[in-house]
Image: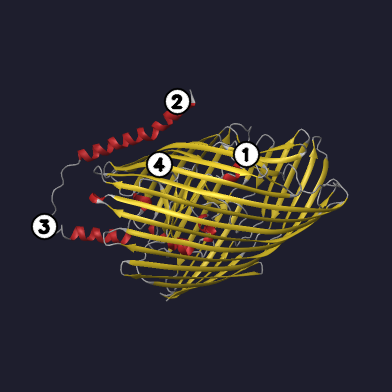
Amino acid sequence: MSSARSTFRLALIPFALSLAFGGSAFAQEAAKPEQKPNQAAKPAAAPTQKVEISGAKGYDERRQDTASKIVVTQEEIQRYGDANIGDVLKRLPGVTIGGVQGRGGAIRMRGLGAGYTQIMLNGEPSPPGFSLDSISPDNIERIEVFRSATAELSTQAIAGAINIVLKKAIVTAQRELKLGMSDENGKLGANASLQLSDRAGRMSYSISGNINHGDFERPSTSSEVFTDVSGKQVYARQTESKSNGAFSSIGFSPRINWNLENGDMITSQSFINANRFRFNNADTTSTTQVDDRLYLNSASNGSSSSASARTNLNWVHKLADSAKLDVRFGANVNRRSSDNTFVANSAKQTLSRTANSSNTDNGFTFGGKYTAPFVEDHAIAAGWDGGYSTRDDENKQTDSLTGSGVIRPINLNETFNADVKRLALFVQDEWTVSKLWSIYAGVRWEGINTQSKGSDYAEVNNRSSVVSPILQTLYKLPGSKNDQIRFGLTRTYKAPDTGNLIPRRFISSNNSATSPDRMGNPNLKPELAWGLDAGFEHYLSDGGVLGVNVFLRKIDDFTRTGISNVNGTWIAMPVNDGQATTRGIEFDAKFPLRAFMDDAPAIDVRANLAFNSSSVNSVPGPNNRLDAQTPVSANFGIDYKLNDMPLTIGGNLNFQAGGPVRVSLNQYSYSIPKRVLDVYALWKFDAMSNLRVSLGNALHQDNISNSSYIDNSGSLVRSSKTPTNVALRVNYELKF
């Protein structure tokens, strides 16, 4: 059977199921007898009671929206006093964080790394060079986790999308001050934030500011062992690394809302952030075999700074017959620079290196959406989404060598520029077929054009476009107010990162198969995926939810990092390499304990569990999974409010499995399971002030991983161990 025919049949599955359930729904509605009017005394009371319940609970997006998503409220975001968004996201179903525990890292859904998860800010892809960690959690209204793509948002979301929604609406005047201190392994930090908001007639405004400073000390060890084909050890190397430094940041975020007399609304929101980072690193290497190319000890120190500004303007214009036009425009500027010195000694030579770099990312975005009730029970929308960004880099490196040996100086004076143009058109419709059944259908065309040129390579042009049809359906089971099922079919893609398209070379100090030089590949193609999602949700009467979700993705032209030896130098480069299949199942639950035990204490329970697996057809098994995919992740958390005290305590245990991965024919990797325990205590002095104390990464588990390269000459295994620390945070929060 051809792949096209298989894909077509796959596409029919959710549609056929939707029709089947829809037929059942129509039959149910048609078979209902005409309801008899209630007694005269009851009609006035019943509607009043219904309105009060709806007003108290509000609109439940997860339950009511046809598109499958999870919504994290502001209360949940601030519960643990987290310093960055990554620590908040790691507790969500199916979301994992790469890197070392307690230090943040790449945000992943379905266990997939390498950019398969789309990170968005107010519904737009985050701009190049913009770090979500620069946004204080206090400025976030909610976080939306989309398990399936939607036409309105970017379909560069093979694993899913995470949308950070910032505060916009200002209901009442508010002044809030937060002061915090932190300690990690004896290194102190401090932070403060201030938020002022008020209304003045038709205008409301808010001004937020935050400042952070901290010191750090991070030792680590690594080893490299080469064994020949007979099993005899050729050499073994051990490196002890010490790193310390400090970081500082300051941010300012004003926003203004205007409600015009004709019902229109204009919103302006801006960010200004500045960061400073300085470091000192020292490496000491011992080896069983002398190699004149090997640096036995090295020391480096330097600093980097960055400044960014982003502004967005949004206009919502009301038209006749409940139609609406929503137009937005944004601009962003980002500047970064670094200055480093590096001194290293080999057996026969001493290298002194100075390196300076500076780069800028500038751009703008524009988009809009038109909605109108053309047909009853339909919510039809059409719109556009575009952007332009340009990046300029300048890198200088000067080497000075003393002594005689095989090492040669590498002097660089590189410049390059990259321009990225993006345009998307979409149309979507959410059709309320009946009280039990709704369908979301949409299609999005998105094109990306990347142009780059540099001082050491010829001009590179890369253009790609994808048409993405999307179908999702929500069906509420007849006879039950609390049970519903979901199905979704999506066409998504992942465009190559700009950096992966540029054939620049980044040089490794001690080049080897497990520590290669790196460069981009201008011939990369986008990865395309068909996806199928299905889920069941059971809602409890007190606001709790129990859910299960399964997914399947078929990815064509998936990208992996290939390693090759070119004239004695190992180089890593991204390459397209066949087809990959990933699948999984996620369970999540959130409920008060009293939902199952009448006399239980005031404990809220949160738990989730996810299993992910994948296979790559161009890599022999076993363990031929997608690189860095997390096979199992889980969270278990509780919040306990003491009845006779103004105290709430809670904790969350996070687990991410590791295990072996065969990355390619010759490459392997392994990582140990990670366990992170966070606990907190919240003492409310009164309605206006409270004290929050939290421990992050209370288990302080060491992070251990290794990578290996095996060929006809033998095997090279590189292992690393990074200790982690407990982070103590104390925050005082005052409203005035």
Q: From mark 3 to mark 1, how far is it between C-alphas?
A: 76 Å
**Disc number for residue 5:** 2
Q: In the drawing, does residue 361 fall left or right of residue 65?
A: right
Is 229 situated above or below 189? above
| Dot 4 crowding, Cα within 10 Å, few <14, some 14–19, many 20+ | many
465 sits to left or right of 368: right
Mark 3, Cα crowd under 10 Å, few <14 / some 14-19 / many 20+, is few
Q: Nearer the viewer, residue 407 or 46?
A: 407
Q: Amino acid at mark 2?
A: Arg
Task: Provide residue 44's location: percent of width, then percent of height.
Answer: 16, 60
As drawn, the residue found furthest toward the left would be 40
Residue that appears at 39% across and 42% down: 426
Helix, strand or loop at label 4? It is strand
Q: Secondary structure at mark 2?
A: helix
Q: In the rendered image, which residue does mark 1 sit on?
A: 521
Snapshot quadrant of residue 353: bottom right
Q: First in sequence: mark 2 or mark 3? A: 2
The residue beneath circle 4 is: 425
Q: Earlier in the sequence, mark 2 or mark 4?
A: 2
Q: Secondary structure at mark 1?
A: loop
Q: Is residue 111 above or below residue 619?
A: below
Residue reaching furthest to the top:
1
Asked if the residues shown at circle 2 and circle 1 are in contact, with their CB atoms under 8 angstroms apart, the answer is no
- Marks 4/1: CA distance? 28 Å
Q: Which residue is mark 3?
A: 40
Give the amino acid at mark 3: Ala
Note whether residue 354 is visible.
yes
**Type of amino acid at the residue the image marks with label 4:** Leu
Camera-side residue: 130 or 184? 130
